[in-house]
Amino acid sequence: MTVRFTKKFMSSMMLLQLLMTSVVSAQSGNTTEISYPRVAADVTFAQVQSLSASRPARQIAYGDDALQFGELWLPATSAADDAPLVVFIHGGCWLNAYDIGHTHALSTALAQQGFAVWSLEYRRTGDQGGGWPGTLQDIRAGLLAIDDLSAFGVDASRVVLAGHSAGGHLALLAAGDQPFKAVIGLAAITDVIEYAAGSNSCQTATSQFMGSQPEEQADEWRAANPVQQRLHPRTLLLAGDADAIVPLSQAQVAGISTLIQPGAGHFDWVHPGTPAFNLFVQMVRNALSQ
């Protein structure tokens, strides 16, 4: 059975959650700024996992499953205007072994730089209802909640959608023609058919996510393949030339702008101390200023 989350349903659910007992933590996690010193490029996943992070201001469900929620991070200081929003989709080869936790430092750093962050958790391969197409349906449901975030001082008219790795793949597919200021893929998987032909652990997880091989369900693979879809007109791909998980060829998409960060590895994009992360922030600011 496919559940379709309508905007009316989402608004009602979020209002009910606020009136009752949504999972809310005080914004204490944002009161003390966390420093992220500069580090050399090509960081490891272990380095990302070891980073300190504040707590989100709120955790809000966008569906009934325990994994269907977003974490809302708010800027530490008040401003005269509502904060622009970065919607972020974490990666992890679409596998449930990798959750939202490893991007808490990214969300913390973005909030410290004045952005609100709506970071989405979702069902992944290994979770009931996860994999294709349930994972993408979760992301689309999470995006329906954006307008309701204005109740928390978020400017829902200034939004950048971004995703890392498998999360970048989902961002590209979910963006559609929505009025985002930009859609940014960080080491994004743009061609799942080409990617599935590789042999690293993330590449071999592609068929697990899809539940088939490309030749077995060609129509499903086509629907899940960003390069075979009409992408958002403001799509930007950021990639590192030292990425051993997502080949640089995945950043070469006809008609789409690409920036290559020299020396950057796969996880640099989610480590606030790297030049790659600084480039990401610069691109977010550029998009929001237009």
Image (tube, rainbow, N blue to C red):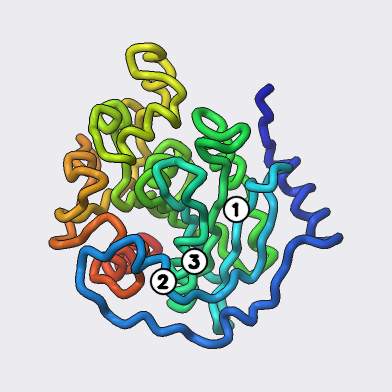
Q: Tell me the element at label 1.
A: helix
- In this view, the residue farthest toward the right is 20
Q: CA distance from mark 2 to mark 3?
A: 11 Å
Amino acid type shown at disc 2 = Ser
Q: Position of residue 210 (x, y in %)?
A: 44, 26
| Residue at (35% x, 47% y) in the render | 165
**Are there few (<14), some (14-19), or many (20+) residues within 10 Å of tag 3?**
many
Asked whether 157 or 277 is in front, the reply is 277
For badge 1, the amino acid type reads: Ile
Question: Quadrant where the C terminus lies?
Answer: bottom left
Quadrant for residue 222, please give it.
Answer: top left
* Residue highlighted by disc 1: 146
- Please identify the quadrant where the N terminus is shown: top right
In what element is the residue under mark 2?
loop
Task: Tell me if residue 81 comes above or below residue 84 in the rendering.
Answer: below
Check residue 50 in the rendering and tell me which mark sits there, or answer none.
Answer: 2
Q: Which mark is residue 104?
A: 3
Q: Which callout, 3 or 1, points at the residue further toward the start of the chain?
A: 3
Please provide percent x and percent y for residue 50: 41, 71
Q: Using the image, tell me which numbered label, if any, was put on residue 112.
A: none
| Residue located at (68% from left, 41% from top) | 7
